[in-house]
Image (cartoon, helix red, strand yellow):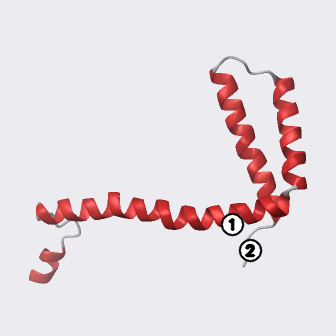
Amino acid sequence: MELSSPRFKALAVTAGFSFWFFVITATTNNFSLEFFALFVAATLIVTQIFALKLSRVLDAFAIFNTKFFLGILFILVFSIYGLVFRMLHADLLRLKQQKES
């Protein structure tokens, strides 16, 4: 099941690359509006030409990203917080008070 069209995904990639091009060139004091416009135009043309292949790659990356990074996030953040609060006997939801009432 495809949630968005390959053309839209290509536009999103163009926007992302353009953002990082702007950030990197602006922080290094090499920003030029002409080069930025040329970069955006070239990136837009290339991503639109390869929109279908790019869409497949982005779908595969999304599956990997979801399973790997969200798994790491769960293990490193939620599990550690759960263990720490359990060791400290912290009852943030105040469930014990509700049972006593």
To which quarter of the image does residue 99 belong? bottom left
Q: Which of marks 1 and 2 is nearer the N terminus?
A: 2
Displayed quadrant of residue 30? top right
Residue 36 against residue 96 in the figure, above or below: above
List x then y, in percent, for residue 64: 57, 64
Where residue 91 sits, quadrant-wise, is bottom left
Instruction: Identify residue type, mark 2.
Output: Glu
Residue mark closest to the camera, 1 vs 2: 1
User: Which label was assigned to residue 5?
Assistant: none
> Does the rendering let one see residue 31?
yes
> In the displayed image of the protein, which residue is found farthest to the top?
29
The residue to which callout 2 is attached is 2
Q: Is residue 42 left or right of residue 14?
A: right
| Neighbours of disc 1 within 10 Å: few (<14), some (14-19), many (20+) | some
Circle 1 is placed at which residue position?
A: 59
Identify the residue shown where x is 16% and y is 79%. 98
Q: Looking at the picture, tell me which residue is in the foreground, 77 or 55.
A: 55
Q: Distance between the residues labelled 1 and 2?
A: 9 Å
Quarter of the image for the C terminus: give it: bottom left
Is there any visible trace of residue 101 in the rendered image? no
Local crowd size for mark 2, using a 10 Å CA cut-off: few (<14), some (14–19), many (≥20): few
Q: Identify the amino acid type marked 1.
A: Asp
- Residue at image location 90% in from the left, 54% down from the top: 49
Q: In this view, does 61 lie to the left or right of 31?
A: left
Return the residue nearer the eye: 51 or 84. Answer: 51
Q: What element carries label 2?
A: loop
Give the farthest residue toward the left. Answer: 100
Instruction: Identify the residue at horizontal 18%, vertical 70% (top origin).
Output: 94
Q: What element carries label 1?
A: helix
65 on left or right of 83: right
- Do the CB atoms of the residues marked 1 and 2 lie less than 8 Å apart? yes
